[in-house]
Image (cartoon, helix red, strand yellow):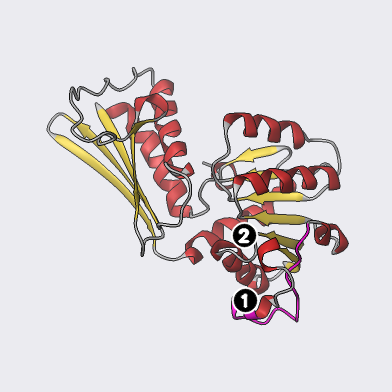
């Protein structure tokens, strides 16, 4: 499979390039990043890339006969890239976060499938298999407790808060309660906030979300359920960006068989 990486100069983009180069059956044919245009990819990622240079425009993808792209950029850039892929027939695997509900609706239209030859798209808020499992475990636990809060912790360079993973976790928790016929969690009883935002933000299903941004962190999430006389804590930690690569490879290799738009890795894992 001929793979292109958009946002190749970023930390995640560099990691994806290294993973694709090392993966049997995948061929890295194009890398795009306007901020690093002309730079030798091998020097950028510290690995042999056969002399490939980073391109500054999306046209390099079609010039190289790219079959699937991986996008780890910013949401405004990702919108442009995905529109380009939909028109040119390139499958897309997207790890960029911050898409709105309107964005997702537009992507459903762009990647409508299932016509033969139509491009497909996988959008996931987190490609770490452990994080996907945490979300599933939280969904299973949701009907059995009286309250829950989510704490997500990321590096200080992350631009959006709360994270896409935390939002997705809250959605899965709300869905788990609804499927079981359970009511929404009781409303927050806090009467006075000494500091604005001390109780976090209210996400889907009334779930409280708290965001931490610190240097030295990568991506971490803790889900704390509370009930009478007990609590349950679920936690996942990504200590290195290599933790996301198994999920990225799974999506690259599976996107052609997933007509239209697929949200999350769960369908690819059978969850």
Q: Quadrant of the N terminus?
A: bottom right
Q: Secondary structure at mark 1?
A: helix
Label 1 belongs to which residue? 44
Examine the image and state in which quarter residue 137 appears.
top left
Q: Where is residue 185 drawn, in percent x and y?
A: 30, 23
For residue 54, above or below residue 146: below
Q: Is residue 204 above or below residue 233?
A: above
Q: Looking at the image, which residue sits at the far left?
A: 229
Residue in the image at 41% along x and 60% along y? 218
The residue that appears at 69% across and 36% down in the rendered structure is 107
Q: Label 1 to label 2, Cα distance in Å?
A: 21 Å
Give the x, y percent position of residue 133: 43, 47
Of the residues under marks 1 and 2, which one precedes in the sequence?
1
Checking the image for residue 249, the label placed there is: 2
Q: Residues within 10 Å of mark 1 (few under 14, many from 20)?
A: some
Instruction: Inspect the magenta stretch and tell me whether residue 50 lies in it.
Output: yes
Q: Is residue 233 visible?
A: yes
């Amino acid at each position: 499979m001929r793979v292109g990486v958009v946002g190749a100069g970023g930390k995640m983009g560099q990691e994806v390039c290294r993973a694709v180069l090392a993966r049997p059956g995948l061929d890295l044919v194009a890398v795009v990043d306007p901020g690093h245009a002309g730079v030798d990819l091998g020097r950028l990622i510290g690995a042999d890339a056969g002399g490939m240079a980073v391109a500054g425009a999306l046209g390099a993808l079609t010039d190289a006969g790219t079959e699937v792209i991986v996008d780890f950029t910013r949401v405004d850039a990702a919108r442009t890239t995905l529109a380009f892929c939909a028109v040119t027939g390139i499958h897309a695997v997207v790890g960029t976060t911050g898409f709105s509900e309107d964005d997702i609706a537009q992507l459903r239209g762009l990647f409508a499938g299932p016509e033969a030859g139509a491009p497909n798209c996988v959008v996931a808020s987190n490609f770490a298999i452990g994080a996907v499992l945490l979300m599933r475990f939280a969904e299973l636990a949701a009907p059995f407790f009286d309250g829950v809060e989510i704490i997500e912790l990321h590096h200080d360079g992350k631009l959006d808060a709360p994270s896409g993973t935390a939002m997705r976790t809250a959605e899965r928790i709300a869905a788990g309660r609804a499927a079981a016929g359970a009511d929404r969690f009781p409303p927050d009883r806090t009467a006075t906030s000494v500091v604005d935002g001390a109780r976090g933000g209210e996400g889907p299903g009334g779930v409280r979300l708290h965001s931490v941004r610190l240097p030295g962190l990568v991506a971490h999430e803790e889900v704390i359920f509370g009930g009478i006389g007990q609590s349950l804590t679920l936690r996942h930690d990504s200590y290195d960006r290599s933790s996301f690569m198994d999920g990225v490879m799974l999506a690259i290799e599976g996107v052609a068989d997933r007509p239209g738009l697929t949200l999350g890795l769960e369908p690819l894992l059978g969850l």
